[in-house]
Amino acid sequence: QVQLVESGGGLVQAGGSLRLSCPASGRTLSNYAMGWFRQPPGKERQCVAANSRTGGSAWYADSVKGRFTITRDNAKNTVYLQMNSVKPEDAAVYYCAATPAYYSGSTVYTGTRSYDYWGQGTQVTVSS
């Protein structure tokens, strides 16, 4: 199993930047496709960014395209979400997730059901 622990959330002003980190333990992330999801209060959890196992393919929700970037550092066994030009509507609990992708290095997964492992979430609050 892989354990994920998000960090880096907090209060940010609209227009500012934040970087979320998701270090993993138990398994090497180079065998996993990764995703970042968010869940505002009273709404469903949705994918905002996803990364293939090799890191060569990425997907972004239209609402964050051009502002958020998902990256991974396999040496540190960590996935990041760089959030720039943050908007009030970006406020949510953010989760990172991992799914084994031994046979498909380029597939990107965006559905919650595709992921087997989840972190506990980190709160992002945006002040306008």
Image (cartoon, rainbow, N blue to C red):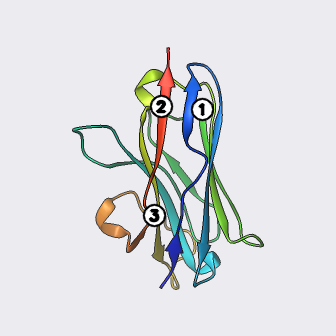
From the image, tell me which residue sits under label 2: 125
Q: Assign a secondary structure to mark 3.
A: loop
* Mark 1 crowdedness (10 Å alpha carbons): few <14, some 14-19, many ≥20: some
How far from the left and from the top, in percent, is residue 97? 46, 64
The residue nearer to you, when weighing 104 against 71, is 71
Q: Is residue 72 left or right of residue 27?
A: right
From the image, tell me which residue sits under label 3: 119
The residue nearer to you, when weighing 101 against 90, is 90
Q: Which quadrant holds residue 90? A: top left
Could you give the CA–CA distance between mark 2 and mark 3, rounded to whole angstroms? 18 Å
Closest to the camera, between mark 1 and mark 3, is: 3
Q: Amino acid at mark 3?
A: Gly
Above or below, comparing residue 30 to residue 23 in the picture: below
Q: Which mark is residue 67?
A: 1
Could you give the CA–CA distance between mark 1 and mark 3, rounded to whole angstroms? 23 Å
Residue plotted at (49% across, 37% down): 124
Mark 2 in CB contact with mark 3 (< 8 angstroms):
no
How far from the left and from the top, in percent, is residue 101? 50, 79
Q: Which quadrant holds residue 11? A: top right
- Mark 2 vs mark 3: which is more N-terminal? 3
- Mark 2 vs mark 1: which is more N-terminal? 1
Q: Which mark is residue 123?
A: none
Could you give the CA–CA distance between mark 2 and mark 1, rounded to whole angstroms? 16 Å
Q: Assign a secondary structure to mark 1.
A: loop
How far from the left and from the top, in percent, is residue 7? 58, 53
User: Which residue in the rendered view is the most extreme toward the right?
Assistant: 75
Q: Amino acid at mark 2?
A: Thr
Residue plotted at (65% across, 31% down): 17
Q: Which quadrant holds residue 58? A: bottom right
Above or below, comparing residue 33 to residue 47 in the picture: below
